Image (cartoon, rainbow, N blue to C red):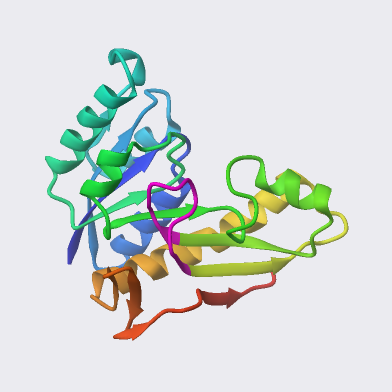
Amino acid sequence: MISVVVLISGRGLNMLAIARAANDSALPVRIAAVISNRADAAGLAAANDLGIPTVVIAPARFPDRAAYDVALAEAVRSHSPDLVVLAGFMRILGVPFVREFAGRLLNIHPSLLPAYRGLHTHQRVLEAGDRIHGCSVHFVTEELDGGPLIAQARLTVQPDDTPETLSARVQRLEHRIYPMVIGWFAADRLQWTDEAIRLDGRPLTEPFIMEAQT
């Protein structure tokens, strides 16, 4: 069983999906702490209800981004995590933080990267008329939403989809694929070393694809 720290900024729905899988013994992880940059993040109360320790590190308490990142790294480090999971953490991480946790820092993004990095992905997909959409799990690097891809889940955009319905459908995929990838890491099936991702000992040259109709 590995120790995980989860970073959130909002509802923490992916955090809850991970916690549910862990509680059901489907995922060999222990969430050591949930850390947020927002005191009003709804996911904090949800974590507390599950008995998971929570920490708030508000940016307003620090003079600049560098000082904030130092405090965040100290908070994460204090829990000695094997893995750090970004689950809707709406803040760009600084280079020293990313380098410290490189190879054990995961993120999930609501698009089929490298398309639609950044925000408002569902609206942008609809405006572009794309027929396929989904989410991506990747290792975090210094490049925003640009780290090596591990897995993607894809669905077909429906003619009547709105940003809200598309978001809900993609989130259901996120709640399946993120615990799956974390499980690979926990079982030592997934590593990122020497600039190469390996899954079950073989180089992962293309992301694993989960096809879904939701």
Q: Residue at x 26, y 41 (%)?
A: 97
The verdict on residue 145 being magenta is yes
User: Front-most of 190 and 25?
Assistant: 190
- Residue stretch rendered in magenta on the structure: 138-150
Instruction: Tell me where residue 93 sits by quadrant.
Output: top left
Give the main secondary structure, helix, strand or loop, of the magenta stretch. Answer: loop
Counting from the top left corner in percent of width and height, residue 140 is at: 38, 53
Compared with residue 162, is residue 59 higher up or lower down, i.e. above or below? above
Q: Residue at x 25, y 23 (%)?
A: 67
- Is 139 positioned to the left or the right of 13 in the image? left
- Most extreme residue toward the right is 159
The verdict on residue 75 being magenta is no
Instruction: Tell me where residue 77 sits by quadrant.
Output: top left
Q: Residue at x 64, y 56 (%)?
A: 115
Q: Quadrant of the C terminus?
A: bottom right
Residue 26 visible here: no
Counting from the top left corner in percent of width and height, residue 98 is at: 30, 46
Counting from the top left corner in percent of width and height, residue 185 is at: 29, 69
User: Front-most of 5 and 193?
Assistant: 193
Q: Quadrant of the N terminus?
A: bottom left
Compared with residue 94, is residue 208 higher up or lower down, i.e. above or below? below
- Most extreme residue toward the front is 194
Q: Residue at x 52, y 59 (%)?
A: 174
- Is 16 positioned to the left or the right of 160 in the image? left
Residue 89 visible here: yes
User: Front-most of 203 and 171?
Assistant: 203
User: Front-most of 109 and 186?
Assistant: 109
Counting from the top left corner in percent of width and height, residue 16 is at: 40, 50
